[in-house]
Amino acid sequence: MKTVEAMKQFENIFGAKAEDLFTAAGRINVIGEHVDYCGGKVFPAALNLRCNVYGKKRGGNKIRMAFRGIDGIVEIETDKLDTYKYLKIGNYQAGVAYYLQEEGIDIVGCDLYYDCTVPFGSGLSSSAAIEVATAVTLCEYAGVPYDKVHLALISQKAENKYAGVNCGIMDQFASAMGKKDHAVLLDCATLQYEYVPLQLGDYCLVVANCNKPHNLVESKYNVRRQEVETALKTLQTALNVTCLAEVTPKQFNEVKYLLSGVVEKRAEHVVMECDRVNQAVKALKKGDIVELGRLLNESHYSLRDLYEVTGKELDTLSALARKEADCLGSRMIGAGFGGCTISIVKKTAVEGFIRRVGKAYQDSIGYKASFYETSIEDGITVEKL
Ligand code: GLA
C-alpha cells in the first residue's frame, strides 16, 4: 500500500511523481530451518513487512536509487553493472540488474525510491525483499513477461554470486510467491510447492526481534554450508542420495558412525528438521496446534544444540516465551546468530505476553527486544499509481 510520505519523498528527490509501486515481502519461516540448501522442505510465509519500490521509468542508462532514512542518491549505469559489488547500499539491486541483463533483458534507466519496512538484519529477509522487488521493477520497465519463480532464482543468484552470501532459495521464493494467510510448503530440491492455510484457531504467531547487533552472520552461514557439504560427501560413500534431505532418520542412525564432531551434529539437525517439517504440516492440517508448538520448540533446541546458530539472545527470548502459559512453542527463524523468533501465542494473551517477555528479556540481556505486528500477505505486488 502506498504512503503519502513516500510519494512526497520521491517527488522531492527526483522532481517528478512516482508512477508505479512494486513490492516484495519479508518472510517468516514456520519450520524447516537451515535445510533449504540441503534439498529439504521449508515452510515460510510472506509478511506485511515489505520492500516497497516507488518507480518512474526514464529511459537512458542510469538507474538512480534513493532510500528511506538515508541521504543521497546511488546511481548505477546499465552498461557497467558488473562493477558495483563493492557498494554497501545498492549492491543487491546492481546484482539483480546484472543477472537479468545477462539473460538478455534490456535494463532501462529509471528512478527508484526504496521504502523497506522489513527491519534490516532481523532474519526476516530484507535482502530477499529488496532483490525480488528490484527484479520485478526492472522486468516491468523492460516490458518483458516474467515468471515469479524465475525472479526468485535470479534474486538468489545475485545474493550468492554478487553479494557473496551462499543462501538457499527459501527467502526469495517466499518473498516472490507468498500468498495471503497461507504458508508455502516448498520442496527446495524440486521447487514444487503447495500453499497451506496458516490457520491457528485461537492462536497467532508473534514475531520478536532479539536486536542483537549484526555480526559476521554471512561468514558463519557460509561455514555451516561447507560443514553439511562435507557430511553429504561422507554419507554418499554409504548411501545412494543426492542431498542430505533424502536421508531418513532411520538411515542416519545406521550410518552416522561415519561422521564425527560438528559435521555429525550439523547433519543430524538437517535430517531431523526435515522430518519435523513433515510432522508439522500434518499437525497444522489437522488443526493440532499443540503438536505444532512442540515441533517449533524441538526445532529451536536442534538449532541451538546441533546446528549452533542461536546464541544467548535468541535462546533467552524463546525460553521466556516458552515459560508463558499461553504460548505453545517458540523458535528462532532465519539464519540465526541474531534476528527474530516466532512464538505461537493465544490471541487473547498477546498483550501480556509481549509485556512480560519484553521486560524479562531486557532485565536479562540489557537491551530491549522488538515485537512486530505482522500479517501474512501476498509476495510480489504491482500497482499503477
Ligand atoms: C537464511 C538464508 C536461507 C535459509 C535460512 C535458514 O535466511 O537466506 O536461504 O538458509 O537462512 O533456514
Image: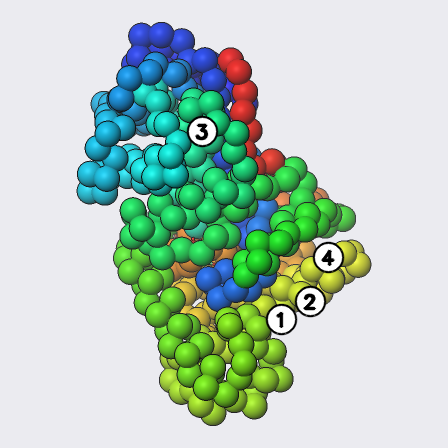
Q: Is residue 89 visible?
A: no
Tag 2 residue: 279
Q: Is residue 262 left or right of residue 41?
A: left
For the residues bearing labels 2 and 1, Cβ distance under 8 angstroms? yes
Q: Earlier in the sequence, mark 3 or mark 1?
A: 3
Q: Please state the horizontal and vertical placement of residue 70, each as a whole percent of the image.
A: 28, 28
Observer-side mark, 3 or 4, equals 3
Q: Compared with residue 380, is residue 299 higher up or lower down, i.e. above or below?
A: below
Observer-side mark, 1 or 4, equals 1
Per the model, the C-alpha gap separating discs 3 and 1 is: 38 Å
Residue 284 image label: 4
Q: Please state the horizontal and vertical placement of residue 219, each as a whole percent of the image.
A: 29, 60
Q: Is residue 142 visible?
A: yes
Which amino acid, by three-letter code, is at mark 2? Gln
Q: Please state the horizontal and vertical placement of residue 240, each as a whole percent of the image.
A: 54, 81
Q: Disc 1 beta carbon < 8 A from ligand 1?
A: no
> Which residue reaches farthest top?
16
Helix, strand or loop at mark 2: helix
Q: Please state the horizontal and vertical placement of residue 139, each as a whole percent of the image.
A: 45, 29
Residue 323 image label: none
Q: Earlier in the sequence, mark 2 or mark 4?
A: 2
Per the model, the C-alpha gap separating discs 1 and 4 is: 15 Å
Q: Earlier in the sequence, mark 3 or mark 4?
A: 3
User: Where, quadrant-wise, is the N terminus in this rendering?
Assistant: top right
The residue positioned 60% from the left and 36% from the top of the image is 378
Residue 275 image label: 1
For the residues bearing labels 3 and 2, Cβ distance under 8 angstroms? no
Viewer-side residue, 169 vs 183: 169
